């Protein structure tokens, strides 16, 4: 029973990575729960092309490692900053390439089978900017992962992650309330993952979101 955590930002030190570590600390308080964390900045991934849909994963060793970690995990977490109103290019590229194993051969049906996932975001803007704009402009990430069959459990946005105007550096290590919140969220997410591991199903309310999406897709197919 394990959680795969993927950090998409390239800054070092990284606020997203620090929050991911706190999340992991909380998750591993659930008995029997382990985690595997990787940082995309340390991985060598080619840019997506349709050739990446080869189901035998005859591509880079790093991508095959990420694929196996995703497939073996009972839940997964993506942690990344919001840059210019969206997620970093490295993470978007990985999401594009996930279609090679997270979609069936028709590329129209997800294969993640309701696997729960959680998102952690950081940004220089305050929380109101996230709620008013950036949550919308980055909404393709949870929507894509739900299209792949994942169950969206929740997210955390940590704003004002700068030491001053235009000064991007590690600041969340000085925010004990934020770190405590991430540990609590990690623990709660791990409880969901534990249930999924035992039953093969995410909580009902999260499965309902996936059903609504699939219903919408079916309607679009009929009228197109």
Image (cartoon, helix red, strand yellow):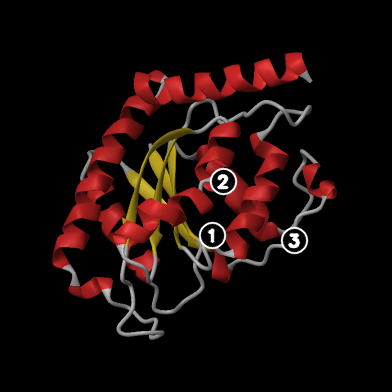
Structural crowding at the residue carrying mark 1, measured as other residues with C-alpha within 10 Å and reported as few (<14), some (14–19) or many (≥20): some
Q: Where does the image place residue 175, in percent across and percent down from the top left?
A: 18, 69
Does the image show residue 118?
A: yes
Decide if residue 139 is on the left or right side of residue 170.
right
How far apart are labels 3 and 2 at the CA level? 18 Å
| Mark 3 / mark 1, whichever is N-terminal | 3
- The answer to whether the residue labelled 3 contacts the one labelled 2, judged by CB atoms less than 8 Å apart, is no
Which sits in the foreground, 219 or 81?
A: 219
Percent x, y of residue 16: 38, 65
Cα separation between marks 2 and 1: 9 Å
Q: Which mark is residue 86?
A: 1
Judged left or right of residue 213, residue 5 is left
Residue 47 is tagged as 3
Label 3 element class: loop
Identify the mark nearer the N-term, 3 or 2: 3
In contact (CB < 8 Å): disc 2 and disc 1: yes
Closer to the camera: disc 3 or disc 2? 2
Residue 140: mark in rendering: 2
Residue visible at 31% across and 85% down in the picture? 164
In space, the residues marked 3 and 1 are separated at their CA atoms by: 18 Å
Q: Looking at the image, is mark 2 or mark 1 earlier in the sequence?
A: 1
On the rendered structure, is 27 left or right of 35?
left
Q: Residue furthest front?
A: 132
């Amino acid at each position: 029973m394990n959680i795969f955590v993927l950090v998409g930002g390239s800054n070092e030190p990284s606020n997203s990575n620090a929050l991911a570590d706190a999340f992991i600390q909380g998750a591993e308080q659930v008995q029997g729960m382990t985690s595997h964390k990787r940082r995309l900045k340390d991985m060598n991934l080619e840019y997506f092309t349709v050739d990446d849909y080869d189901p035998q994963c005859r591509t880079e060793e790093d991508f095959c490692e990420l694929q196996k970690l995703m497939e073996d995990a009972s839940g997964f977490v993506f942690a990344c900053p919001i840059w210019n109103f969206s997620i970093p290019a490295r993470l978007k590229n990985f999401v594009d390439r996930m279609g090679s194993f997270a979609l069936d051969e028709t590329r129209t049906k997800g294969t993640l089978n309701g696997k729960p996932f959680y998102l952690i975001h950081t940004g220089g803007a305050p929380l109101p900017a996230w709620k008013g704009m950036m949550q919308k402009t980055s909404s393709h990430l949870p929507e894509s992962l739900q299209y792949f069959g994942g169950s969206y459990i929740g997210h955390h946005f940590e704003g004002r992650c700068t030491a001053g105007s235009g000064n991007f550096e590690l600041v969340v290590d000085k925010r004990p309330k934020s770190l405590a919140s991430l540990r609590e969220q990690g623990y709660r997410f791990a409880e969901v993952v534990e249930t999924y591991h035992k039953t093969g199903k995410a909580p009902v309310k999260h499965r309902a979101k996936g059903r609504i999406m699939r219903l919408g897709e079916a309607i679009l197919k009929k009228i197109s």
